[in-house]
Image: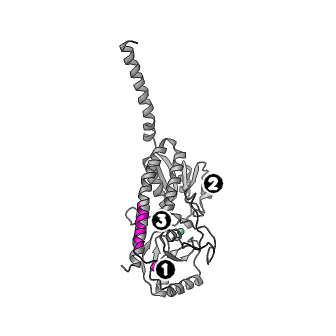
Amino acid sequence: MNASLRRHTLAIVAGLGALAFSLPGQAQTSAPIKAVASFSILGDLVRQVGGDRVQVDVLVGPGADAHVFQPAPSHAKQVAQAQVVFANGLGFEGWMQRLLDNAGYKGAKVVVSRGIKPLRSGAPDAGHKAGKHGHHDHGEADPHAWQSVPNVITYVANIAQGLCAADAAGCEAYQRNAEAYTGQLRALDAEIKAAWAAIPAAQRKLITSHDAFGYYAQTYGVKFLAAQGVSTESEPSAKGVGQLVRQIRKEDIKALFVENISDPRLIEQIGRETGVTPSGVLYSDSLTGAQGPAANYLALMRSNTRTLTQALQGR
Ligand code: ZN
């Protein structure tokens, strides 16, 4: 081989190398994959893992209630265009299967709570056996698993796996994003535990609108009593409210909270009957808009924890 031919061969090899390297690059500049997330909190988690490669449409937006959501034709259109659909599962999106059927959706469906041990309603606090004292929605799975940060670490792993299956070329990026975000979740979990450590266990009891904080209660050692069950669908009975009012007096509970997705009138009524003033808003099932205090999942958990601990510390 003479010098000129050798140079020529090297040029071809270099050219092939450039071609091989250009393939992942091309995938990155192509259109992002389309994903649908059932509700705003999950939408944020999918965006954290998906990054630039994934366009996320959210069905139940900030401030809206997924328990009583009624899909419109525009939602079926979003679903029909998606390559992957993310749902919480645990009975949260009772409307989902019908929506997927109506949209003729044939893509992947990822249930992000897969692998989480569900709580049963009526047994929200740690150490209780399910069904022991449930006075409402006896034995129904509690869908609000995202209220415990370790569960969301599982959600993030399921999201990364779902995105990898839908878009293999992006898998490395999804895993990298998931790992970085999981680091932030671990720090958040430690931060919440530290905030509660300052409050004696006997004082960690409060009232909220619907039974959305069972997982938070279990993970962080707080007792929540709720006026409504794990779904907002059914109105609380007068008898149920009366029982709650008696329990607030008996246990000398001093903190009462409204939720962003629930009608505040019930909690206001309980406040009047017990003489306890509502201490703020908790974000249970939905983010706020970008300017609000719960614009993303990390902010939501920080805001709730701050609202709860400050009220119980009398600040
Ligand atoms: Zn809920």
Quarter occupied by residue 227: bottom right
Q: Which residue is mark 1?
A: 267
Q: Is residue 57 magenta?
A: no
Residue 241, image x, y percentages: 55, 83
Q: Residue at x 52, y 67 (%)?
A: 65
CA–CA distance between discs 1 and 3? 19 Å
Q: Residue at x 55, y 76 (%)?
A: 228
Q: Which residue is mark 2?
A: 101
Foreground tag (3 vs 2):
3
CA–CA distance between discs 3 and 2? 25 Å
Q: Quadrant of the N terminus?
A: top left
**Along the line of sight, the residue nearer the viewer: 211 or 6:** 6
SS for callout 1:
helix
Amino acid type at circle 1 is Ile
Which of marks 3 and 1 precedes in the sequence? 1
Amino acid type at circle 3 is Ser
Amino acid type at circle 2 is Asp
Relative to residue 153, is residue 134 drawn left or right?
A: right
Question: Magenta stretch mostly in which secondary structure?
Answer: helix
Q: Residue at x 41, y 72 (%)?
A: 197
Q: Which residue is mark 3?
A: 286
Q: Residue at x 44, y 62 (%)?
A: 297
Q: Dot 3 surroundings within 10 Å: few (below 14), some, or many (20 or more)? A: many
Which of marks 2 and 3 precedes in the sequence? 2
Up-down: is 187 above or below 270?
above
The answer to whether residue 295 of the structure is visible from this angle is no
Q: Are marks 1 and 3 in contact (CB under 8 Å)?
A: no
Q: Is residue 204 magenta?
A: yes
Up-down: is 92 above or below 225?
above
Task: Look at the image and give the residue range highlighted in magenta.
Answer: 187-206
Residue 250, image x, y percentages: 51, 87
